[in-house]
Amino acid sequence: MTVGSKLGILLGPICGMCLGYGMLELTRVPEAEIVTEGLLYVLLSIYIVCGAMILGGLIIGRSPQRVLCQDIAWRLRVSADLLTGQNRDKGSWRESQNLLQKGALPLLTNVKLSGMEKIWAPEILNRLRQASLHAFSCLALSRMAVTQIGWKEITQNEGAAKIAQAMRDMAEIFERGDIAVGPKVEVGANEGEKHPALQEISEQLQVFSEQSKVPFPQAPKTGFILPGAFHSPENYRFATKGTLAVAIASCLYLGLDWGGIHTCVITCFLVGLPTVGEMVSKQAARIGGTLLGSVFVFWGMIYAIPHFTNIAQILLLVGAGFLASGWLKSGPERFSYFGFQVTVVLALSELGKNGPSFDLTTPRDRIIGIWIGLMITYIIFTRLWPTSSVTRLPPEFQKCFSALERQFASEDRIMRLFWASAAQGAIGGARNFLQDAKAERRALRSSANRLKTIGKALNQAQKLMETLLLPPTDERTLYAERQKKNLKRLLDEAELLSIPGKAPATEDFRKNPAPT
């Protein structure tokens, strides 16, 4: 279900864990009536938690429209910092790279969620859609302008300063939850010819949130089971490896009659991923989160809880831990699981009983179980049919090529931005797989030269995407063609093309043109 259905690697392991671990615990219950009562209490607890989340979301949760406006404002401010050279030492360039990682997909997702609220007019949603694409484009063009002009000269450029001030004014409007209409910023004829990125930004600001009747391509609806799920050998191999890891962990903790290390089974479900690179990265986050959560738990049991006199103090301690772990979970994707693991350790150690726990063996057993699960999963997934993260790169480059081809052929600006966002999303996904590939063990890892070539190909693809953001001219068309040939050459060197010298086959993507 993890690799063959829409549950994916987020919900698939959780569903499998609940089913598998629940069936294991049923064997430890002597009477069926107790099982029924336990299941009812589990359902009741789920209803209480879901109800509390819904109620809390209605009371203190922010509207997706409000979150969207804040995200657009932040991208405008980062773009302004790039054009003026401000906050360079504080990482404005790195922040812009992080914001561009998934293209405009996070913004467009919030547009979709805003539409599900049924309280916003279609005209408002259309304007937010346009603003989302233009915010992504302005950020990419700002990076392009800095690259072409240089940090030293751009701080003295009057046109860049005017554009940056206009962006900050628009950001203030978006931060209030309103939709800003960009002013007309005159860059100058000579300045526009010399620095076309600045000219394009000024033109996009004028139509930043204007309505557009251009429809976006929609992905066809598919069933719960992904196409080809039952015909892929990789799916069967992954299922076999996961089943073997869970079976070994289950036999170990049941055979030893050591119920405290049941976390080894949970770990096998949560850490097992299709590629070795993804699994190693997740294991590192789980180890770090376990260590941090364990330090907090042991400190609380030894120094804090013995001095508590009422339940409010315990709730305050646990709440502080959950607040810190929640803050970590809301961060970047690679830190998100780290925060989640801290939460799991706190919950299993502090909330395992009805009252405060002073037994240090409880967190000890939980930690031992996690380490056992990590070792079992690592040994099986790296020795039995190991799959490198590099094998996930060709589909991402296929999506990137297809999006770049459509961006190149689009005459409408909005469609150019749409396909640029799709290409950037594929580039971001490929960068994640490349980073995971570098964490693999040496016997499975690709050569350093190959990984370096793949990195160059990703940089070339992003450079081509930025070039195609500008209005097409004969000179830029020839330049884009040279960049495309250079990109294909790099992919040939990295052995990522099925047919040397040609772009990857895009027939499947042509049937499903909308980025996912």
Image: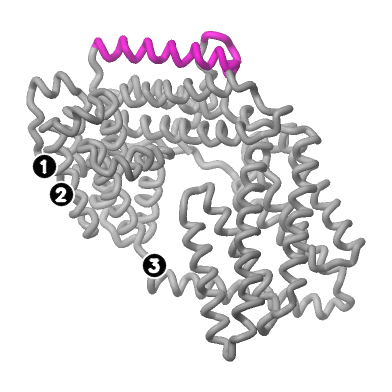
Q: Residue at x 26, y 42 (%)?
A: 130
Q: In this view, does 422 lie above or below 63?
A: above
Disc 1 to disc 2: CB gap under 8 Å? yes
Read off the magenta span.
474-501
Q: Which residue is drawn at 36% across and 64% down?
A: 62
Residue 240 spot, x, y in % from top left: 80, 42
Residue type at tag 1 = Pro
Q: Is residue 315 above or below residue 289?
A: below
Tell me the element at label 1: loop
Q: Is the magenta stretch mostly helix, strand or loop?
A: helix
Residue annotated with mark 2 = 169
Of the two numbered discs 2 and 3 in the rendering, the one whose residue sits closer to the viewer: 2
* N-term mark: 1 or 2: 2
**In the image, which disc is placed on residue 61?**
3
Q: How far apart are marks 1 and 2 (CA)?
A: 9 Å
* N-term mark: 2 or 3: 3
Tell me the element at label 2: helix
Residue 388 spot, x, y in % from top left: 67, 31
Question: On the rendered structure, is 204 left or right of 386?
Answer: left
Residue type at tag 2 = Asp
Q: Distance between the residues labelled 1 and 3?
A: 33 Å
Residue 291: quarter of image? bottom right
Q: Residue at x 23, y 24 (%)?
A: 149
Residue annotated with mark 1 = 183
Residue 2 spot, x, y in % from top left: 66, 46
